[in-house]
Image (cartoon, rainbow, N blue to C red):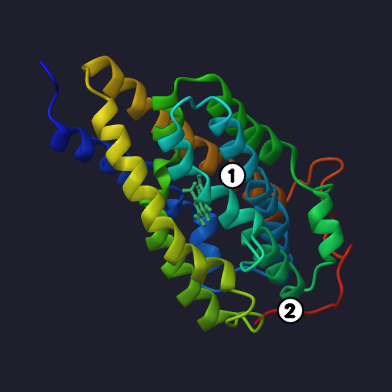
Amino acid sequence: MTPDKDAFEARLRQIGAERYHDRHPFHHLLHSGGCTPEQVRAWVINRYYYQASIPMKDAAFMSRVEDPALRRAWRSRIEDHDGTDENEGGIQRWLRLADAVGLDRDYVASTEGVLPATKFAVDAYVRFVRDKTLLEAVASSLTELFAPKIHAQRIEGLLQNYEFADDSSLSYFKNRLKEAPKDVAFGLAWVLDHADTAEKQDAAANALIFKTNVLWSQLDALYSAYVEPGRIPPGAWQPGTFETRQKVAS
Ligand SMILES: O=C(O)c1cc(C(=O)O)c2c(n1)C(=O)C(=O)c1cc(C(=O)O)[nH]c1-2
């Protein structure tokens, strides 16, 4: 018997309600204006690694897809981040944010100061998408169901609380509000259609849980290095370095 799609969708949404990284204390600090300029910079440096890896993850996915229609539906994700002749793309928009918070953009793009745990988590996501079933790979992208809400909260919170925030520095998030809904509508419909046994539904739900862990771990690493207890691992970015000016925010 094919399991109920509505109940399955509700199960996926419940995973987001319980585990998405909008609940993480680092995001509460960031969005409420509680981050120091250095903590904002640490977030921009580390999150860049995620941004830069997303199109590689999507390319890894597409390399395994045999159905041209599915590849065609997926390929705009790579263009959204890497850009086109007309669209500068998410990676460049993220580097605009790096400029605005007072970081050397070449340093950010080098990914040299990224926390080891951030690299482990993000690399694990790319590997997961490369190695698991297509269903699990698509399901792992479904955290984006919950992203528009956090992007809207972030735009509002940053604009209210930090001097660096304006239309240009926050253009990454404004664009994602336009781009993400089409991706997630497609991904959700695909998962609901293809998870046609209880076992497949379990696998897809577990893939989504895995992905919430990828996101949560990145913020845990950030919090422990730059908030409490402030233990920066060897080789990770040291506040006061690769900055283009002394003060940024609030
Ligand atoms: O700011 C965020 O909280 C956030 C979260 C996520 C996510 O849920 O993985 C993505 C994004 N942003 C994002 O901007 C983005 O392009 C993106 C792509 C993907 C993915 O898994 O394919 N997730 C996310």
Q: Position of residue 36 (x, y in %)?
A: 68, 70
Q: Image point 43% across, 56% down: which residue?
A: 180
Which is more foreground, mark 1 or mark 2?
2
* SS assignment at label 1: helix
User: Can I make out residue 140 in this image?
Assistant: no
Q: Position of residue 209 (x, y in %)?
A: 41, 32
Disc 1 to disc 2, C-alpha distance? 24 Å
Q: Position of residue 88 (x, y in %)?
A: 66, 66
In this image, 166 relative to 117: left or right? left
Residue 57 found in image quarter: top right
Most distant residue in the front direction: 68
In this image, 88 relative to 195: left or right? right
Which numbered tag is attached to residue 220? 1
Q: Position of residue 138 (x, y in %)?
A: 42, 34
Amino acid at the residue labelled 2: Val
Pick the front one: 2 or 68: 68
* SS assignment at label 2: loop
In this image, 108 relative to 84: left or right? right
Q: Earlier in the sequence, mark 1 or mark 2?
A: 1
Q: Image point 64% across, 75% down: which residue?
A: 169
Q: Is the distance from the Cβ of mark 2 to the nearest ligand 1 atom less than 8 Å? A: no
Amino acid at the residue labelled 1: Asp
Q: Is residue 127 above or below residue 231?
A: above
Q: Image point 66% across, 54% down: which residue?
A: 82
Which numbered tag is attached to residue 23? none
User: Label 2 belongs to which residue?
Assistant: 248
Q: Is residue 65 above or below residue 226?
A: above
